[in-house]
Structure formats: C-alpha cells, structure tokens
Amino acid sequence: MAASTVFGSVYAQTLPRLRWRLSSGWPRALDIVFGPRSGVEFIARRIGELTEGRFEVSAHPAGELVPMPGLFDAVRGGAVEMGHFWSGWYFGVSPVTAFDSGLPFGMSSRQKNAWLLHGGGLELMRPFYAEHGMINFNAGHSPMPMGGWFRREIRAPEDLRGLRFRVPGMGGTVYARLGAVPQLIPAGEIFLALERGVVDAAEFMSAHDDERLGLHRAARFYYYPGWQEMVNTMTVVVNLERWRALPKPYQEAIASACAEASSRLTAETDAKNAIAMVRLARGGTQFRRFPTSVMRAAHTASVEVLEDLAARDAAFRAIYTPYMAFLNNQRRWFASNEFAIEDFVRTLPVRPS
C-alpha cells in the first residue's frame, strides 16, 4: 500500500497541469442541475479531486461565457472545452438529439439509464456527437417532468390550438401538430415571458426547478404528467480534438465525474420535488391532470411525428428502431411487477408525517 501511494504520487506529478472551462445552459438559480451536489459545479469539482488538483475545471452558468442557444456550437468549435446542457434544445440541428434528451411517451429515468449504459444507447449516440466534433457523457436524469404551467385550464385537445407554449425539442414538434405554437425560450427568460403574457404556457422540468424559476408566480395551473419527455437527460459534451489530446487519467476523471453526477442528480431531484410539491400546493398552485382526451391526442400525434421522422431520416431511424425494441421490453417488465405494486400503493391512504 505504501509503495502504491508513493508511485501513484510520482505518476501524478508527471501529468500536465491543465485548466478548462465547463459552460452550462443553466442559471445559478437552478441549484440541482448547476449546483454543487450533482450538477455542473459538482462535475467540475470532482474532476479536480480525482486528478489531485492537476486538472482544474471551472463551472460557468448560462450566459457567463456562452448563452444556451450557442453552447452546442461553442463546444464544437472549441471556444469552450466542455458544455453541460439538455440536448433537445438543439433539435433543429438534428432530431437525433431527442433520443439523448427525452422522447414524448418514451423511457422513464430508470429505463433511460438502462438503455444508455446496458442497451447500447450511449454507443448509438456517440457517432452523432463525433460528427459534430464532440464526445458525449450522460450527466444525469431529471425524472418525469411536469406537463407545464398554464394561464388557463385545458379541458380538451381543442384548447391547445393557437396556444403559445414554451416547449422545445420533439415535444414542441408534437405540440405544433396539435395546433399549439411552440416557443424556444432559455431557462432564465421563461418567467418573464410567462408573466408578461408573451407565452400562454411554459414547461421546464419539475416542481423544484420550476419553483426556483418562479413559474408558480406567473401561472396558476400546473399540469401533469409531462408526456412531452418522460425524462430530462443532462449531457456533458467535450470538444473531440481536446478530448483526444487529454492524458488517459484525465479522460477517466471526466467519465467518472459524469457517472457520479448521473446517479446523484436523479436522487436529488426526487428528494427535492416531493418537498416542492407541498410548498406549491400550500401557496395556491392548482394542480391539474391532463384530460384523457388530451393524452390520447398527444400520444397519437407523438407516434405520427416519430414515424414520419423515421421514414425520412436515416440517422434517426438507425436509433429509433433499437430504441423502441428496448423500450417495449422494458414496458413488459415494468408492467408485470413495478406497475402492479404502483397501482396498489397509490390507493393506500397517505399517513400524516
């Protein structure tokens, strides 16, 4: 043990000292995805710890170095070495990003993690990012987002027509097919857009993050479930040229820090959402479940969008086919056991805390 400690220390001293920047798409107010326990700040700190301080990475909120809309290009072009974002924002670059970020009526957080790590998902996504000069790492799943904040109630699919809705990614494409008007608005600007009536509704993540943005002060009705993406997956990207030049231990430090963040982010989100839901309810938020007619219309539109994309986009189809095969198997497994107990326990009375 003493010998390994000595030689390990000598080996570490042979590695270069590097300073990189990790730019994110999140404001500091989002204390989970940006914060020190499982977000951007955590990843930056862990890389330093795992390399005994020789590889320093600084964490930067959206806009400090690069605004969210330009982050993809900034990492691709090498303006910053690393980025942390929700890739669905770049759906316009390629619909393939939806498999990374989250699909309408797609996988849950656990299923998505299984697909990425043991179902070939990460390997399927790597060629897309490599084509754009980056390598990607899963940095965590924000489980089951809410359906969004609405200034008026939604009683039928017809109520979505003409609705100006802040909803990016493939979810926005599906909402457009339902007659809504999707809007692309970065996280830090959603509150003002909703408060001032620039949009009629807005979705972001789930209770804790939405509360941190103050969305409950701009709209009364909070709808669920978040079918537009069953999970919000966070992605860390590294400029591919810079990645290839890194010493192997530094590459392993990045991969390990992201893997740690992945498990921590889901746990932190679940823990904080439960508390935030109580606060929101006590503060007057009106929780609403999407009517069955809206859910059925949304599901039909989602299938149509997915099938259309698979028919005309070979890159999309190459991932869509194995993704759906994996999802179908997962649903069979969950339906036989997980859903059975969930159906039962949700009928039980909630004990006072």
Image (cartoon, rainbow, N blue to C red):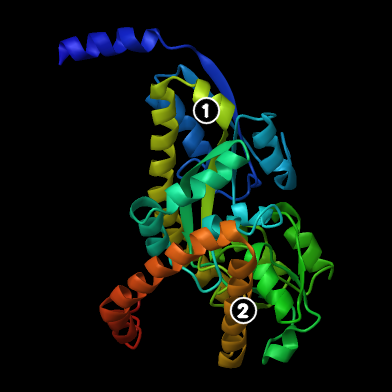
Mark 2 residue element: helix
Q: Which residue is mark 2?
A: 304
Q: In the image, is 101 to the left or to the right of 153?
A: left
| Residue shown at 74% from the left, 61% from the top | 191
Q: 252 above or below 170?
A: above
Q: Which residue is mark 1?
A: 243
Q: 222 above or below 8?
A: below
Q: Earlier in the sequence, mark 1 or mark 2?
A: 1
Mark 1 residue element: helix
| Residue shown at 56% from the left, 91% from the top | 292
- Res. 65 visible in picture: yes
Which three-letter amino acid code belongs to the residue tagged 2? Glu
Tell which tag, 1 or 2, sits nearer the viewer.
Answer: 2
| Residue shown at 58% from the left, 26% from the top | 241
3D distance between C-alphas at marks 1 and 2: 38 Å
Q: Is the C terminus in the top left, top right, bottom left or bottom right quadrant? A: bottom left
